[in-house]
Image (cartoon, helix red, strand yellow):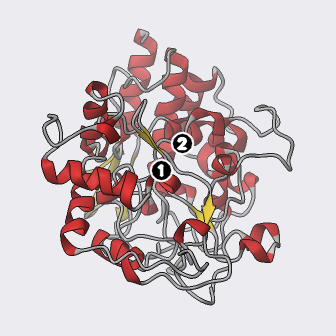
Amino acid sequence: MTAQNLLSYCACSLIFTLVVSCKDDTPFQGTGEVYLDLPAERYQYNNFTDSNNAISTLGRVLFYDRNLSLSNTIACASCHKQEYGFADNQQFSRGFGGKFTTRNSMPVQNLNGSFLMTAEDLGFSPNSIPDHAHLFWDGRETQLKKLVLQPIGNHIEMGIADAETLTAKLSALPYYTTLFNDAFASPEITSERVATAIATFCDDINTVNTRFDQFIQTHFNPVDATVSDGGLSPLELKGMLLFEQKYNCNSCHGVESTNGYISSGTFANIGLDIEYADPGRQKVTGDPADAGKFKIPSLRNVAYTAPYMHDGRFATLEDVIGHYSDGIADHPNLDPKLQDDSGHARNMNISEHETQAIIAFLHTLSDKSVLSDPKFSNPFKVK
């Protein structure tokens, strides 16, 4: 970093102070003067150039800045909290006017950089985009840069309905002049640049250092492992085998044994209801066959992202497994993998010991470093 940039970053920390009354549902706690605290040397993200790290740094500030909401009370981080795997620990998230969202906030992690590009950039026609490339619970978006602007403009979440209002608000804040200039070699603030910065920061949030990752580095094909193999306890290993073999959870959640990535997959109706108040994927496609289908989420850091499902109906992992054990509703669109040989809802009868084993395995998918890494943390501090 140049001496000029160092002075600019120090100036940012000194210039930005304002008196705020902070609420518990915001990224700030307590009351007092808020200041922007950025290190003199930029954090190194998953990028290879200093300019990209500058974009991620800007994205981090924007992600935590409540000025991106109409009432200056809600940030992206209000609903995507670092300590909860960048999900929300509430069933529904409170928006800028006190109203609540209608879906549980999905975790922001392992989004895979292709989402920074359009479907056309990736070589897909609008009608041939694979399911795994869709974002949101209903898959209505395929580009992360577009996704990050939608909560800002949402009438419940953050409430800034037009780009001009957003750019005017940010342009009035002195600390963004240097941050945008460092990121884009120009201080100009545009909604496109805002989207690029937030999307780049979000794309850098990756869980790659779980105990499961460490285990498969020495066990190329973990489904063939036995309790004599090191790395996982006997209970965790049993849970993995139940997950991947007996109950075939792997067929939806996509454990790829070659690299240990627990990926989000396609869409599925998992029999939460006979009649869905929220139609899910059908709301996007208009196809009755998609009624009750929702995006299958990643299970990385799943031990920290409760509550679960699109409506946050399950408070614990025990509740989730209980649903699959004996609570699957016999919906016409029920995923075939959850049907028995007669085509009706499958009754798995998962025992208590098996439940605890599966949960023990799910805990091995935790990367706690992401939950506390300072480069992903709130840069705004309260005196």
Query: In the image, residue 352 lies at what x, y percent?
Result: 20, 74
- Asked if one can make out residue 165 in the rendered structure from this viewpoint, the answer is yes
Q: Of all residues shown, which one is farthest toward the front?
A: 341
Disc 1 residue type? Val
* Foreground pick, 52 / 328: 328
Looking at the image, residue 107 lies above or below residue 197: below
Q: What label sits on residue 338 in the rendered view?
A: none
Give yes or no for contact between labels 2 and 1 (Cβ–Cβ under 8 Å).
yes
Please give left or right for residue 1 compared with residue 140 in the image.
left
Please give left or right for residue 271 compared with residue 190 in the image.
left
Q: What label sits on residue 108 in the rendered view?
A: 1
Residue identifier under label 2: 111
Query: In the image, residue 265 lies at what x, y percent?
Result: 57, 52
* Foreground pick, 11 / 47: 47
Quarter location, residue 165: bottom right
* Foreground pick, 275 / 67: 275
Disc 2 residue type? Leu
* Quarter placement of the N terminus: top left
The structure residue drawn at horizontal position 39% and vertical position 18%, both measured from the top left corner, is: 6
Looking at the image, residue 136 lies above or below residue 258: below
Please give left or right for residue 150 compared with residue 58 in the image.
right
The structure residue drawn at horizontal position 36% and vertical position 56%, both measured from the top left corner, is: 243
Q: CA distance from mark 2 to mark 1?
A: 7 Å
Query: In the image, residue 107 lies at what x, y percent?
Result: 45, 55
Q: Secondary structure at mark 1?
A: loop
The residue carrying pointer 1 sits among few (fewer than 14), some (14 to 19) or many (20 or more) residues within 10 Å by Cα, namely some
The structure residue drawn at horizontal position 30% and vertical position 51%, both measured from the top left corner, is: 241
